Amino acid sequence: MSAATKKIQVGIVDDHSLLRKALAKLIGSFESYAVLFEGDNGKDLKNTISQNIIPDLVLLDVNMPDMDGYETVRWLHKNYPQIKVLALSMFSDENTIIRMLRLGAKGYILKNIEPEELKLALDSIMKKDFYLSEYISGKIISGLHKDLGNPEDPIVLNDKEKEFLRLVCSELSYKDIADKMFISPRTVDNYRNTLFEKLKVRTRVGLVMFAIKNSLVEF
């Protein structure tokens, strides 16, 4: 990276000061990233953003006092949808994972992961707009399958929409997907926005979750 290249600005929001400081030091060691600020909870994040200090990505804990991860990611998704959120938690139950993803988080990682996976998650979210590890994908499948006892009216997708969904679950960016499908980036945007409306989801992760639930892709 050249000295003139702007680093990706990261905000860390976690009420455990020791962990937060360790994360800041680790992320600061990654070549493409810089820590813009740290906060104890969602209120700290809101106050920081109100001062026009706006990160590209927020590493967000779930269980925090005053304003927890659920409320914070909902607020971010509504007011600053351009800020990408990577949830970070000790909780590994499928309900917590699925709830954070449905509220707008681009990915979910556990606090016991290795540093290499944190770097992979950050890179994946910045490049692909989502990150799901094999473990988290398994948890999502488990949680979504519990919903199958109350079948909904089937959603009919055409072949192109199914192909787009399968590619959304891959390592490809939206631009790469356009090249792969031999269509323009604008057409890819149209597929994405149509499926957002049809499937009642708001993020790429939501599209991935639908594809997993309906066996359009396997992890």
Image (spheres, helix red, strand yellow):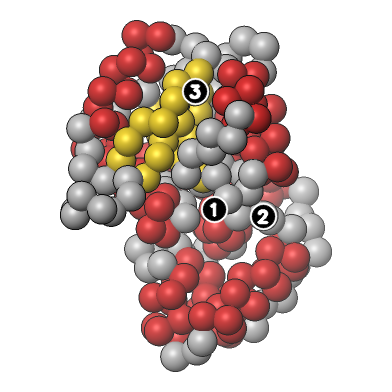
Q: Residue at x 52, y 76 (%)?
A: 164
Question: Disc 3 versus disc 2: distance between alpha carbons?
Answer: 23 Å
Residue at the image point whose x is 26% and y is 31% from the top: 28
The mark nearer the N terminus, 3 or 2, is 3
Kindly identify the amino acid type of the residue bearing the numbered disc 3: Val
Circles 1, 2 touching at the beta carbon (< 8 Å): no
Q: Which residue is mark 2?
A: 202
Residue at the limit of the structure toward the front, as seen here: 4
Q: Position of residue 175 (x, y in %)?
A: 43, 75
Residue 120 lies in quadrant? top left
Numbered-mark total: 3
Read off the residue under disc 3: 13
x and y percentages locating residue 57 in the rendered image: 46, 41
Q: Where in the figure is residue 9, as x and y percent of width and height?
A: 40, 40
Identify the residue at image location x=40%, y=52%: 126
Kind of residue at badge 2: Arg
SS category of the residue bearing label 3: strand
Q: Nearer the viewer, residue 136 or 60?
A: 60
Q: Is residue 170 visible?
A: yes
Which amino acid does the dot numbered 1 rest on? Val
| Residue 175 to residue 114: above or below | below
The quadrant in which the C terminus is found is bottom left
Q: Nearer the viewer, residue 128 or 101?
A: 128
Q: CA distance from mark 1 to mark 3?
A: 21 Å
Q: Which residue is mark 1?
A: 205
Q: Would you say residue 103 is visible in this rendering?
A: no
Q: Residue furthest right?
A: 153
Q: Which class describes the residues within 10 Å of circle 2: few (<14), some (14-19), or many (20+)?
A: some
